[in-house]
Image: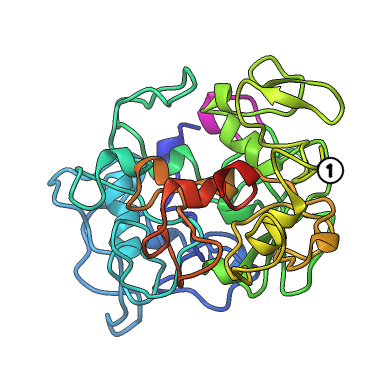
Amino acid sequence: MNKYSIALIGMVGIGLILLTAGPATAGDYHRGATLICSDCHVMHFSQSHGYNANGGGLFTPLGPGTDGYAYLLRNEINDLCLTCHDGQAFAPDVLETNTGGGVRQAGALNRGGITPYFNATGHTLDTMDTAPGGTWAPGTHGLTCVDCHAPHARGGPTVANAYRNLAPTAGGLASFDPPSYAITTNDLTKDVFEIAAGASDVSQVNFNEPDQTKSAYGNWCNSCHSSFHGGPGSANVGGIGSPAEEFDRHPTAGVDIGALGGGHSSKVVFATGTRSGTGPGPKINWVKVMTATENWTPDTPTEVTDHTPSCMSCHKAHGNQNAFGLIQMNPLSGAVTEQGTAGGTYKHLCSQCHTQAL
């Protein structure tokens, strides 16, 4: 079935508190008890009241078209998604300024190049551009929410409930497994840990490393941005030696911080934000990394063991107010924002792990 037959997606955020839904069955919506057909589809493109017997009840408004939309949708894909996911109190706001508060793990999509969310700051809805570092290009509708998310929450071959309803066929590839996730109680065999069901705040989402040679998150991004992803020895990343160094592109899996010892990335720098481990400090802000130890914010070098950077370490999945959606986070000062920290720079991002940036 064509992807445009599907309903409104749960964007990379906490999942929608649906207008007519009951309790959620997991951390993301548009599945199970919260997969509500009428939130996104309408039979005759004519509705003047709700679904209660007395005509009451909220419903998603119809789009401006007079003849309806393909596959019984209430509006065009992006406009339909944004009916709930832009500026509403009951659902995560994924477009530009966050009206819901908090620091979004995924950041913000942009649309139309409106300052400060220019097209260069991340994923741009409706764009016809080919994905950077890849060959995939959007269809006739431009980039849509359902290019990345499965609105009916379809998982991959072995992952039935994918993190953020991420689609198992992104970039037009054959079906594969999106990242899996655990909720409330961590499961180190899962790729992502949400502290609470539907969590989207950066403080409530962490990343496990079930396989130290791979990143399920990076593998998913790779489906569109194929040149940018891989581990040591892959054709597009390169690297020599063991542990590897001299990379052509920054690896997104298979390389632990400080593995070489004494240079390049540093356990001391990642733990303390300094070369020596003593002043100025202490380190208070860490970018997201994958680890199997559940210690995502180590503050002594001995705690830095299997910590591995991947896509989410440097970029917001949707974007933010920085070029490329980069997370410019000062490790030693400032409150965490979607941009990193106030006054954060590109150098601060590098200095999360690298001695040379200090």
The image shows residue 358 at horizontal and vertical percentages of 56, 50
Give the vertical position of 25 relative to 329 (above or below): below
Please say whether residue 170 is one of the residues in the magenta stretch: yes
Check if residue 358 falls in the magenta segment: no
Q: Which colour style is shown?
A: rainbow
* Residue 335 against residue 146 in the figure, above or below: below
Of the pair 232 and 134, the residue shown nearer to us: 232
Q: Which residue is mark 1?
A: 211
Can residue 317 be seen here? The reply is: no
Whether residue 337 is visible to the viewer of this picture, yes or no, is: yes
Outermost bottom residue? 54
Instruction: Classify mark 1: helix, strand or loop.
Output: loop
Front one among 344 and 275: 275
Q: Residue sitting at 32 percent across and 80 percent down?
A: 57
What residue type is disc 1 on?
Asp
Picture residue at 68% right of the left edge, 47% below the top: 179
